[in-house]
Image (cartoon, coloured by chain):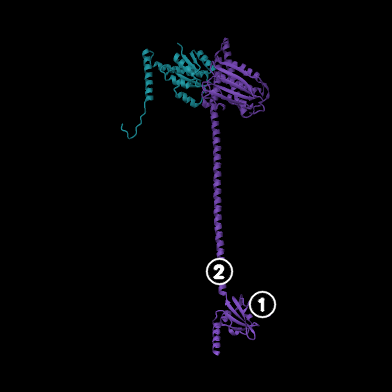
Chain colours: A cyan, B purple
Amino acid sequence: MSTKILVIEDNIDVRENLEELLQLSGYKVSTAENGKDGINKALEVIPDLILCDIMMPELDGYGVLRILSNNVTTMNIPFIFLTAKAEKDDFRKGMGLGADDYITKPFDDVDLLDTIELRLKKSERLKSSFGETSQGLQRFFDESKAQKEFEKLLENREIRRYSKKDNI
Amino acid sequence: MLKPYHDAVIRLQSIFDSAVDGIIIINTRGIIEEVNPATQKLFGYNEDEMIGNNVNMLMPHQFAVKHDEYIDNYLSSRNAKIIGIGREVTGRKKDGSEFPFWLAVSEVKLADRSIFTGFVHDLSEIKHAETRLMTLNEELEKKVIERTYELENAVNQLLSLNKQLEDEISNKIRIQKQLKEREADLELGLAKERELGELKSRFVSMASHEFRTPLSTILSSVSLIARYTEGEQQPNRDKHIDKIKASVVHLTGILNDFLSMNKLEEGKVDTHFETVDVIDIWNNVIDEMYTILKADQKLINTINIERAWIISDKKILKNIIINLISNAIKYSGEKGEIRCTLDYQDNIFTISIKDNGMGIPKEDQKHLFQRFFRASNAINIEGTGLGLNIVKKYVEMLNGNITFESEHLVGTEFKVRLPTKSGNTTY
């Protein structure tokens, strides 16, 4: 089974070139032309890695990452931004949202393929630490869910403030 | 008989002796015959020094020389100047000092001759008092004048103070006005600065996206060409060469927009006005536009026109129409409808381009014609934010106007109105 990569990019030329480049490198490639379409494709094919633009109609790359990292089935898929937003602030924002890497346009093909390979290897190592048995998989899901629940707990927790006079 | 006469003499003598006023008796030649003690006291001569001498010894020089004449005049003309009337005259004392007195003279006719009696009533005290009164009066007047002057001074000072205050107030008002003007200037400067800053950030974000995307295509196509090393892979290489060409054309387009904007900003765009067939240009553009329609998009061309000639600039007119129709295509989805209508009424051509696309959010509408501005719902769609800015300037160059109506998610209609004589008509 070959490695699956999802490319989410609105510009048709860039999208086609990425698809071609990745196919030539032996990957199985799915494409989406906007963020909304990208989410659907991600849930449908469960790719091994996602390459995503930021400035897109319908739903931008930040939105895609936010939604996918809130979904148990997609939250651990390596996510790489490939974007024209080259400012330092944009980079910080992308990484802050939990992206695994950030590549700016125009990009060098070798750099891109190296980065993809590196991210896939890391992800592979993470998966194997849970083992490849169904038991391991179950554990992986459980821990993911536990982490998810924990985060929810954090979010919903009401912060109570006490003044000096209060008796606790 | 002797006793009563003697008594009368004594009585008269005592009156004569004790009178406070001086009494002088002279004869018709002016010689003093008798003086009473008061006279001696008044004039400082004793009796012996006066009796037998002319009465003019008791007068200042200017009167003394004429006294005899006065008497003669009276005796011959009987025309009285003093006698029976009295007059204020000046006396001369033994020590030479002079004093005023009231002189009353009367003629006494004796049996054989006439004598004159003069009563001398000293006026020195009265005169002195009068003088003092006058001095006092004068002093008083002087004081009044002084006080008036002081008062005037005070009033003048007050007036000048008032004027100073008024000047100061008007000065302050002027300064306040200047401050306000400066404040307004500063605010204007700040607003301009802010606008420039905004323009810069809009330009940076636009340039970043609009340049980097075609550059990505070029770079990745080049990378791919490098991978197709086999002879039979020529079609692959050709495909990428076409992509590179298209990207270069796209980049050139952006560059041209920049240059147009710059030229327009600097007023360097030349217009060439000539008689133009509007329908001809319109149909040419519409034909071009059919080729860039998205899948299932429809273009509905309506020409409600009888007159087809306009004095205008061909190139600019064409650019306006191309820009508006390609915008309508770009911002409408597949299956969208683009209605292009040409109208003419009262010497004005109206171009209407209406779509049923994404529309322009209300809050963005007022900024739509600004350089580099992208509506909030178009930020992620390719574009420089220059097209409408350029169109507006082009329309203005043709003395026309451009308006639009738009509703978010419903559609947009742009209307351009052009006078038939664009070259010299304003409306």
Secondary structure, mark 1, is: loop
Identified at 48% across, 14% down, the residue is A30
The 10 Å Cα crowd at callout 1, few under 14, some 14 to 19, many 20 or more, is few
**Please, which chain is the residue tagged with disc 1 on?**
B
Which amino acid type is marked by label 2? Leu
Secondary structure, mark 2, is: helix
The N terminus of chain B: image quadrant: bottom right
Q: Is residue B233 above or below residue B382?
A: above
Q: Splitting the image into 4 quarters, where does residue A75 fall? A: top left
Residue B126 falls left or right of residue A73: right
The C terminus of chain B: image quadrant: top right
Residue B199 falls left or right of residue A130: right
Identified at 54% across, 43% down, the residue is B176
Q: Is residue B117 above or below residue B427?
A: below
Residue A78 falls left or right of residue B309: left
Label 2 belongs to which residue? B133
**Please, which chain is the residue tagged with disc 2 on?**
B
Q: Is residue B79 above or below residue A39?
A: below
The 10 Å Cα crowd at callout 2, few under 14, some 14 to 19, many 20 or more, is few
**Residue found at the very far bottom of the displayed protein:** B2
- The picture places residue B235, in percent across and down from the top left corner, at 58, 11
Of A56 and B411, which appears nearest the observer?
Answer: B411
Label 1 belongs to which residue? B79
Which amino acid type is marked by label 1? Asn
Q: Splitting the image into 4 quarters, where does residue B234 fall? A: top right
Q: Splitting the image into 4 quarters, where does residue A163 fall? A: top left
Q: Earlier in the sequence, mark 1 or mark 2?
A: 1
Foreground mark, 1 or 2?
Answer: 1
- The picture places residue B420, in percent across and down from the top left corner, at 66, 24
Q: Are marks 1 and 2 on the same chain?
A: yes
